Image (spheres, helix red, strand yellow):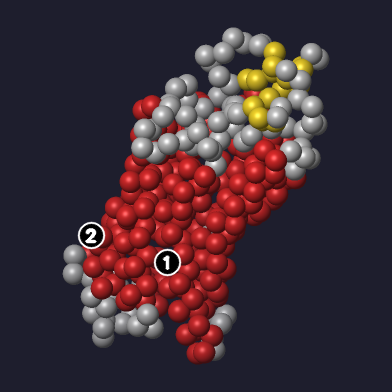
Amino acid sequence: MSFQYHLFPAVYILALIIGLPGNLAALFVFSVKTSPRTAFGVYISNLAMADILILCTLPFRIHYHLHRNNWVFGELTCLVTGTLYFANIYMSICFMTCICVDRYMATVHPHTYLRMRSPKWSLVVTVVLWCLGGVAILIFILMGPLESGDASTGHSCFENFAKKEWNERLRTYSIVSLIFGSLVPSLIILVCYPLVANRISTIGTNTAKKAVRVIYTILAITLLCFLPNHVVYLLHLLQRLEVIQSCSIRAFIYNARRVTMALVTLNTCLDPVLYYMTTSHFRWETLKRTWLWGIVSRRRGVYTISSSILLQHSDGWVRIGRQHEKPGSILPCVNSSGWW
């Protein structure tokens, strides 16, 4: 189990070096430099904000693990940083799910998407999510310190809870977060992204193939960071509920939980990489006023992944979603069938 004292600090330092400047740049671009705002931009901004909040707690956790899981910053700081860390992990996957649904609707149901793509609806969704997360954090903090089940190795923070704490405070939180913060979002992503990829793959050009590769890369990174954590967390709950009682399996779950928690934190430094790789037009060094998740680019008559959408017109294709273009302007017909 001593591997965790080196694994967590290494991963957290990497996340801070890459994730903090990357997410700050993304937040600046989408919140300040980008106009007009879109539903996609709102979700990306909030995803970056959730990642930043996670990253702000990492210096405390680095110190904690470097000192062999001994917390020295007091009970209140433990509660605040712990709840911020775990709550925003769930917020991150919720915003990624919102992005997934947004892209699914724009690709598979574009006419319906036109009626609901106003930024005000995405703002309502994000406000509701933040309110739910904030209320959960506040209630958890107001309930007071958490009792550790083992004080032999120092003062634990958000781990090794006593059985009484688990039964009275943590069981309900854990089950609800597993269902609505892990399983449901993962199911939505696993269903929506392949459908979007299948729709785009009907266009047989190199540009479309690149778009499909981007989608599968996003899906792969999401599964790498989140799915292992969800599976191991389910096993952890079964262990806590005493469904799993084998000592060897319990030891495996404990070690696996450490590895998957490190993986889920890597999402904060992989998100900026995704922002960059999904469009060839984005430049971090100049912070150009472009969309991180694909600018519409016309190459060989094919439109890549974009925050805009296309509607088929009797005389060709009409692009919707950019206010600086004249409404209803007709673009040349796309030779290949399909969207984007």
189 or 36: nearer the viewer? 36
The amino acid type of the residue labelled 1 equals Ala
Question: According to the image, label 2 marks what residue?
Answer: 77
| Picture residue at 37% right of the left edge, 65% below the top | 11
306 or 226: nearer the viewer? 306
The amino acid type of the residue labelled 2 equals Thr
The x, y position of residue 241, in whole percent, is 52, 76
Cα gap from disc 1 to disc 2, whole angstroms: 21 Å
Compared with residue 13, is residue 237 higher up or lower down, i.e. above or below? below
The x, y position of residue 110, in whole percent, is 70, 29
| Picture residue at 50% right of the left edge, 90% below the top | 247
The x, y position of residue 270, in whole percent, is 46, 53
| Picture residue at 61% right of the left edge, 46% below the top | 214
Compared with residue 287, is residue 192 higher up or lower down, i.e. above or below? below
Question: According to the image, label 1 marks what residue?
Answer: 262
Structural crowding at the residue carrying mark 2, measured as other residues with C-alpha within 10 Å and reported as few (<14), some (14–19) or many (≥20):
some
149 or 66: nearer the viewer? 66
Instruction: Please tell me in which quadrant of the rendered image residue 200 appears.
Output: top right
In the image, taking residue 77 as reference, residue 314 lies left or right, namely: right
Disc 2 secondary structure class: helix
In the image, taking residue 204 as reference, residue 128 lies left or right, namely: left
For the question of whether residue 13 can be seen, the reply is: yes
So how many labels did they put on this image?
2
User: Which numbered disc, 1 or 2, marks the residue that appears first in the sequence?
Assistant: 2
Structural crowding at the residue carrying mark 1, measured as other residues with C-alpha within 10 Å and reported as few (<14), some (14–19) or many (≥20):
many
